[in-house]
């Protein structure tokens, strides 16, 4: 039996970050692949947008170079997602 796929980007991010636990992070690609393993690149923009919303709500933290981003609206480059510490 296969594991059920998350129905939304929000659900994928929250489920994967919660499963990792405090002090661990996930790559945005992991959340995108949970939604669509074949077309995950198309989902990456949605993952970033939802990550920003979740970061602002305090449900997750967006990390750059191991540190929380100061402004989720303007950060650039490679990032990871984790539960707030």
Image: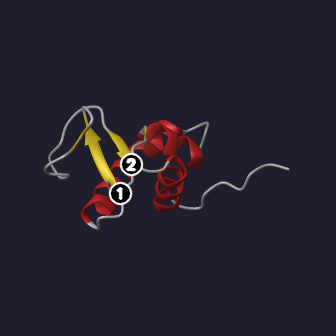
Q: Is residue 3 left or right of residue 78?
A: right
Q: Nearer the viewer, residue 5 or 46?
A: 5
Residue 51, position in %: x, y? 34, 54
Badge 1: residue crowd in 10 Å (few <14, some 14–19, many ≥20): many
The residue at the point 54 percent across, 57 percent down is: 15
- Mark 2 secondary-structure assignment: strand
Check whether the beta carbons of the residues at disc 1 and disc 2 lie within 8 A of each other: yes
Which of marks 2 and 1 precedes in the sequence?
Answer: 1
The residue at the point 37 percent across, 46 percent down is: 81
Q: Is residue 55 left or right of residue 1?
A: left
Residue 28, position in %: x, y? 42, 41
The residue at the point 34 percent across, 48 percent down is: 48
C-alpha span from label 1 to label 2: 6 Å
Quadrant in the picture for residue 6: bottom right
Total marks placed: 2
Q: Label 2, on which residue?
A: 82
| Image height of 54 relative to 1, above or below | below
Q: Name the mark on residue 60.
A: 1
The residue at the point 74 percent across, 51 percent down is: 3
- Mark 1 secondary-structure assignment: loop
- Quadrant where the C terminus is found in the figure: bottom left
């Amino acid at each position: 039996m296969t594991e059920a796929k998350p129905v939304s980007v929000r659900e994928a991010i929250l489920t994967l970050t919660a499963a990792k636990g405090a002090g661990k992070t996930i790559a945005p690609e992991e959340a995108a692949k949970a939604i669509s393993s074949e077309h995950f690149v198309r989902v990456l923009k949605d993952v970033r947008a939802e990550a920003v919303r979740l970061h602002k709500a305090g449900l997750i933290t967006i990390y750059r170079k191991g540190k929380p981003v100061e402004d989720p609206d303007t950060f650039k480059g490679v990032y990871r997602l984790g539960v707030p510490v």
